[in-house]
Image (spheres, coloured by chain):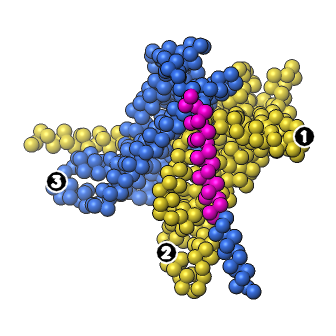
Chain colours: A yellow, B blue
């Protein structure tokens, strides 16, 4: 007995350190991501000039006198994300309301797995679907309105991303709506409101911070999406002119040119990654503020 | 008059809810039907030969690479994730600064776009550690990427284990380690499994993080140092070339099938988990 006790104690302490070390890896990984991106990207930004890089309207990395302005990509990323929200948010929120309060049980067992399946489909499969269905569809619309266009456009990316963010918005909004105490709904019914009115005027407003959080997560997903956007958006590195014309997102810029870029060109792509990180960082902060605000009211 | 107006807005909202829910359902059914109808006829035996040639455009090596990628990534990320969660849930007091740091780090990691992981993996594992475009570089990059998924789900699973288990264990004279490994962890297995399956789905679906880390070689990798493309990367390469549309459809069918299997497994495990939770 006396000999096993110290052994025992040693094992306890040893494993506590193993657990602590494992926990530290997440922090270490995050630090490493920042270190490697900044170490490689910051010199490029310094060489190009911060203002010239962020507000430059010309992206001509291969020219004899190259120009590295990422404003066209920043603008395209923002436009495409906003468009995706316009398409995806109403569909997503109404679907969430439907799942939480209107869906017959028999339909629920079909619709809920459907939404989860949407969440699991790889982005390349979405992108491919975009190429074979959405791009030709947008080409027709574009032909009708502008008399031309290839279909590979910001509009195609907006539609595709609008579909891709649906599961995020539906699932998180649904749980937020379900988390509203049932007494809200019943109280509203007791006051004489109809079922529909109770859901939309009482329950949904009570869940608004959760619903808002789902939209922000959707924004994060849309900004960060790469492959699906590359496959349908046309990717012309110029200031966006019309949703029927092509545009190049920040993420696309990296994937398209990283394969052959060298020197300052390559480092400027890593700097594009830093811009993307800053975007995600801002979205994270907004998300934290929104969910923190909602925490006291949920209790 | 006001009553009629109210009835009308009620009706519109009601109709809109059904309409948008129907859109969600129809969009998905359309995507699946379109891919299955166009892809299944292309599922020829040549697509499943073990060596890729430009004639057979076989996806078999990519399937095998995907299995390697999933397996190796999970081997690294799952223990790390579980140990992290054990530390967060079982060892530290609430409100501890280190815990808050780890939580925010995991949250940040979860939000970083996959293309940024690709850049980072290329810079750190590919160049700094000299792994180049290889299975190993891809595995290490993806391990970090799925770590937050494993941590979050395991944490939830550990928290849902009743304190009675822990107290019972201590009352019988067990040490902390024994309580964690013999009592808490086994009861949390279904929840942890659900997280692992979720992580599998992310690995299978990933492409942007792999192109510049694991590369795009379409053959079965012989070593960890060899470049290999997973099925998603294979699909991207095919649809980019433009003259392999049929093969791309067929690959999409296989990817959908994998996602369907993964989702079904997750649902079954979740059902076991809730049944068990209500029983305890």
Which chain is disc 2 placed on?
Answer: A
Bounds of the magenta span? B17-41
User: What residue appears at the point 76 percent right and 37 percent down from the top-left corner?
Assistant: A136
The answer to whether residue B20 is above or below residue A252 is: below
Is the same chain shared between marks 2 and 1?
Answer: yes
Relative horizontal placement of residue A197, taking residue A139 as reference (left or right): left
Q: Is residue B84 visible?
A: no
Marks 3/1 in contact by CB < 8 Å: the verdict is no
Residue A81 colored magenta? no
Q: Nearer the viewer, residue A119 or B140?
A: A119
What is the chain letter for disc 1? Answer: A
**SS assignment at label 3:** loop
The residue at which mark 2 appears reads as A182
Q: Position of residue A296 (x, y in %)?
A: 53, 70
Numbered disc 3: what chain? B
Residue on which the image places disc 1: A147
In the rendered image, residue B270, in percent from the top left (x then y), is placed at 39, 51
**Residue drawn at x 65%, y 31% as measured from the top left:** A39
Q: Residue A220 in the image: x percent, y percent?
A: 64, 48
Image spot of residue A191 (x, y percent): 57, 86
Q: Is residue A75 above or below residue A203?
A: above
């Amino acid at each position: 007995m006396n000999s096993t006790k110290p052994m025992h104690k040693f094992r306890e302490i040893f494993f506590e350190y193993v657990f602590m070390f494992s926990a530290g890896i997440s922090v270490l990984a995050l630090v490493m991501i920042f270190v490697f991106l900044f170490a490689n990207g910051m010199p490029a930004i310094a060489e190009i000039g911060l203002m010239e890089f962020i507000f430059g309207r010309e992206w001509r990395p291969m020219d004899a006198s190259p120009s590295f302005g990422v404003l066209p990509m920043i603008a395209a990323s923002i436009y495409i994300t906003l468009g995706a929200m316009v398409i995806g948010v109403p569909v997503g929120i109404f679907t969430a309301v439907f799942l939480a309060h209107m869906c017959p049980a028999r339909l629920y067992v079909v619709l809920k797995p459907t939404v989860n399946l949407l969440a699991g489909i790889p982005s390349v499969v979405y992108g491919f679907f975009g190429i074979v269905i959405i791009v030709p569809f947008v080409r027709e619309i574009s032909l009708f309105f502008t008399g031309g266009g290839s279909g590979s456009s910001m509009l195609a990316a907006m539609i595709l991303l609008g579909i891709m963010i649906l599961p995020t918005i539906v699932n998180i909004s649904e749980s937020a709506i379900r988390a509203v105490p049932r007494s809200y709904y019943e109280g509203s019914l007791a006051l004489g409101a109809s079922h529909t009115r109770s859901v939309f005027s009482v329950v949904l407003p009570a869940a608004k911070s959760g619903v808002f959080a789902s939209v922000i997560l959707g924004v994060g997903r849309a900004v960060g999406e790469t492959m699906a956007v590359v496959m349908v958006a046309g990717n012309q590195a110029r200031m966006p002119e019309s949703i029927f014309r092509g545009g190049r997102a920040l993420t696309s810029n990296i994937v398209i040119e990283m394969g052959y870029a060298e020197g300052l060109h390559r480092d400027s792509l890593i700097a594009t990654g830093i811009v993307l990180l800053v975007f995600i960082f801002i979205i994270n902060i907004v998300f934290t503020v929104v969910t923190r605000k909602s925490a006291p009211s949920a209790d | 008059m006001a009553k009629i107006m109210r009835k009308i807005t009620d009706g519109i909202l009601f109709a809109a809810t059904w309409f948008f829910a129907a859109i969600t359902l129809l969009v998905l059914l359309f995507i699946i039907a379109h891919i299955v109808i166009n892809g299944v006829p292309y599922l020829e035996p040549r697509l499943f030969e073990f060596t890729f040639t430009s004639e057979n455009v076989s996806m078999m090596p990519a399937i095998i690479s995907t299995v390697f990628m999933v397996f190796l990534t999970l081997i690294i990320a799952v223990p790390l994730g579980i140990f992290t969660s054990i530390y967060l849930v079982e060892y530290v007091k609430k409100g501890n600064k280190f815990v808050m740091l780890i939580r925010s780090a995991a949250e940040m990691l979860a939000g970083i776009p996959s293309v940024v992981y690709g850049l980072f993996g290329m810079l750190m594992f590919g160049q700094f550690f000299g792994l180049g475009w290889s299975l190993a570089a891809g595995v290490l990059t993806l391990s970090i990427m799925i770590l937050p998924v494993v941590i979050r789900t395991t944490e939830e699973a550990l928290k849902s284990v009743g304190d009675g288990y822990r107290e019972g264990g201590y009352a019988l004279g067990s040490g902390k380690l024994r309580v964690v490994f013999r009592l808490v962890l086994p009861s949390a297995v279904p929840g942890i499994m659900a997280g692992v399956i979720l992580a599998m789905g992310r690995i299978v679906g990933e492409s942007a993080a792999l192109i510049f880390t694991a590369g795009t070689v379409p053959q079965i990798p012989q070593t960890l140092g060899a470049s290999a493309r997973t099925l998603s990367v294979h699909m991207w390469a095919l649809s980019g070339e433009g003259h392999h549309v049929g093969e791309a459809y067929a690959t999409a069918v296989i990817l959908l099938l994998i996602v369907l299997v993964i989702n079904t497994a997750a649902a079954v495990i979740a059902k076991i988990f809730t049944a068990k939770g209500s029983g305890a």
